[in-house]
């Protein structure tokens, strides 16, 4: 059964009230610089406008939004004033709010016991999912260009198999390369962590960073890369290789002289 937009927003509001207090919402609004000083429009007012008051925010006029905001909160704003508040900081604030709620909700899942608990501190599984959004959002969420769409959103999730918690959550442009997200996980990396990554996250620099922090990694290998194993007799191997190389060089030189 399809869930309507109104039902989705109702579920979102329930999660918001469960995990974040109005004080925490305001602190996040200041951290993202949506609120820089005392202002008529607070962080919780923007959330109210986008979640509870208007189910058709994108198509409702600014004048109508101002009326709904004043009726619900008592805050009187003009259409131009509200238009200036719907800026990049507002988008960043709502995106961070969504990511924080998603992480809190998913972190409430139960732990999955494994036989490797005594070997690794955490088993960190990182993956992403991408979906298309309307082309009108391409300026903020450029897509990878697939399926004739120009806009797309990518969600990155890093999961700990031991605790059943998500360690990192991020929402960004669909065209962003997966391996660029790896550095965001390094601040929470601990000794004896095992990082499991798909081919899209492969980067020698990132693997070296994991190794330098005494952690482990498991990654798919690109076909263009090669693995070499050290021989127990490197001197004899080098001598044999050098002898073959000299024979080939002599043959080429002799052939040139005959001509």
Image: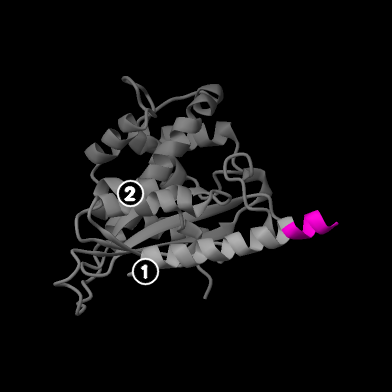
In-front residue for pair 59/109: 109
Q: Quick one: SS at disc 1?
A: loop
Number of numbered discs on residues = 2
Up/down of 156 relative to 29, above or below: below
Residues at marks 1 and 2 touching, judged by CB atoms closer than 8 Å: no
In the rendered image, is residue 131 in sight? Answer: yes
Q: Position of residue 192 (x, y in %)?
A: 20, 61
Between disc 1 and disc 2, whose residue precedes?
2
Q: Which residue is at a point 32% across and 70% down the rendered structure image?
A: 232
What are the residue bounds of the magenta stretch? 254-259
Predominant SS of the magenta segment? helix
Left or right of residue 198: residue 134:
right
Mark 1 = which residue? Answer: 231
Mark 2 = which residue? Answer: 209
Q: Position of residue 50 (x, y in %)?
A: 46, 44
Look at discs 1 and 2 and give the one toward the viewer. 1
Up/down of 139 relative to 243, above or below: above
Left or right of residue 226: residue 10:
left
Up/down of 258 relative to 172, above or below: below
């Amino acid at each position: 059964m399809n869930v309507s937009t109104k039902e989705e927003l109702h579920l979102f509001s329930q999660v918001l009230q469960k995990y974040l207090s109005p004080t925490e919402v305001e602190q996040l609004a200041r951290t993202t610089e949506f609120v820089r000083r005392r202002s008529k429009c607070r962080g919780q007012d923007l959330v109210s406008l986008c979640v509870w008051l208007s189910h058709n925010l994108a198509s409702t006029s600014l004048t109508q939004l101002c009326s709904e905001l004043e009726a619900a909160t008592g805050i009187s704003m003009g259409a131009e004033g509200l238009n200036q508040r719907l800026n990049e900081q507002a988008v960043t604030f709502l995106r961070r709010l969504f990511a924080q709620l998603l992480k809190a909700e998913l972190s409430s899942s139960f732990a999955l016991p494994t036989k490797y608990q005594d070997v690794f501190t955490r088993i960190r599984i990182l993956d992403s999912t991408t979906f298309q959004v309307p082309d009108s959002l391409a300026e903020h969420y450029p897509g990878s260009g697939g399926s004739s769409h120009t806009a797309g959103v990518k969600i990155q999730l890093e999961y700990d198999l031991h605790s059943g918690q998500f360690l990192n959550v991020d929402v960004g442009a669909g065209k962003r390369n997966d391996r660029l997200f790896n550095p965001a996980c390094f601040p929470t990396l601990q000794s004896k962590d095992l990082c499991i990554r798909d081919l899209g996250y492969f980067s020698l620099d990132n693997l070296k960073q994991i190794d330098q922090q005494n952690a482990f990694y498991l990654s798919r290998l690109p076909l263009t890369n090669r693995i070499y194993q050290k021989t127990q007799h490197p001197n004899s191997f080098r001598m044999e290789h050098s002898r073959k190389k000299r024979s080939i060089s002599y043959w080429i030189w002799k052939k040139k002289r005959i001509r």
